[in-house]
Amino acid sequence: MRFFLINDRFQELSGWPEKAPADGFVWVTMGRREFEVNLGDVQAHLQRLAGGALVDLHVADLLNPQLPSQFDYTSWYDLMVFRRLAAGARTERMFLDESTGTASSARQALASIDTSPMGLAVFDRLLLTVHPADCAVHEFFVNRMHQMAQGRENATDLRGSASRLPPSAADLMLRIVNHMVDSYLDLRRLLTRQFGYLQQELLGSRSSRFTNWQALLESRNALHLLEDTCEDQRSAIQEWIDALDEWPTPPDPSAAREREVLRVRSRDVHEHIERVLSHVRRLESSAESAVQMHFSAQGSRTNEIMRTLTVLTAIFLPLNLITGIFGMNFDSLPLIHEGAGFWIAVMLMLGVGLGLVWLFWRKRYLSDD
């Protein structure tokens, strides 16, 4: 459990503050297991600092590792549960090498995307984040805001605008959510490349039988899961935007400007989620197209085989007719008593065969173009 005071500077606290800050807000971040163990202490401090504790249903949501992205609110805080899209623990190197890749690495890349939920409770002067184990999001923000507070960044903040610390708990919540969405945007180029390896194996199996159907099914299921996750994220952010529009307009001009910045950041997060959702759907469409192209190629190859067999059958059918006629048990057949009759029949069959081959070649029955 870590505590930070954010106002005109960024400092780490040794524990819960005695009272809510008059200027700025307190950021409390902890793991899900730590939150569960210290739930009573956390609720007591929230009641003292924020004027209200977490509702029991929201506590269950924060402790649920399978909960989809969603938004809910009360009169004293807002709750955002957001599933992240990032490389899983100890799989980052898989997304860094773009020079090589196989169908197996494509399966691992899709399966290693971490969609663990992170809970954020937004009070007026306090932000509580409950994250899964080995979560790099809060460490990223702690280090980044330390750099910002110490002036190590030259006029750039977390998203590239004017360098300043978050003015409110809601602002920091949106930055965290935006970072989780953009983590997938950082992965999408290589993810597209690695998923392409599986498609190349599928389309390159024209001369050999494609047997990696299980990998293709698992990859498509992973894409469906990503699509569902993105749709839940979009719904949660849209509900937050709708709730933000219902907040009363502050009389202070500076507070009104901060409210407008929150709306801008919210729309930016929503637009980024739309980009992720569009990319996932393009991958799904590409996978469907690859499957259709595979079966079209197999059908074309089958048609070529059937055309070859049909031509051979058409060539040998007249020859079979000739051999059938001369194989009849009649004594008065032409050429039957001639010494050169056999060779005349062979030449006749050869001429008929060559004539049919020439005819089929002129009709382009034997050519691909």
Image: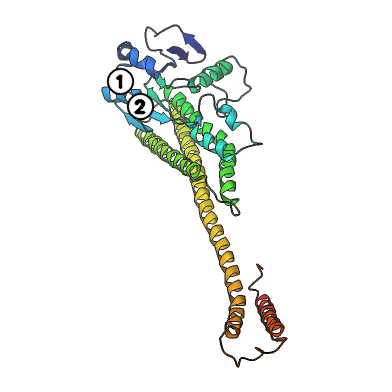
Label 2: which residue? 79
In this view, which residue lies farthest toward the left? Answer: 56
> Is 69 above or below relative to 192?
above
Residue 123 at x, y = what percent? 36, 21
- At horizontal 41% and vertical 21% (from top left) the residue drawn is 129
Residue 344 at x, y = what percent? 71, 85
> In which quadrant of the rendered view does residue 241 lie?
top left
For numbered disc 1, what is the local secondary structure?
Answer: loop
Label 1: which residue? 54
Residues under numbered marks 2 and 1 in contact, where contact means CB atoms less than 8 Å apart: yes
Crowding near the residue tagged with mark 1, few <14, some 14–19, many ≥20 C-alpha atoms within 10 Å: many
In the visual, does 340 lie left or right of 306? right
Q: Quadrant of the C terminus?
A: bottom right
Residue 121 at x, y = what percent? 37, 23
Crowding near the residue tagged with mark 2, few <14, some 14–19, many ≥20 C-alpha atoms within 10 Å: many
> In which quadrant of the rendered view does residue 333 lie?
bottom right
In the visual, does 71 lie left or right of 211? left
Q: Quadrant of the N terminus?
A: top left
In the visual, does 200 lie left or right of 65? right
Residue 312 at x, y = what percent? 61, 72
Q: Amino acid at mark 1?
A: Leu
The alpha-carbon separation of the residues under discs 2 and 1 comes to 9 Å
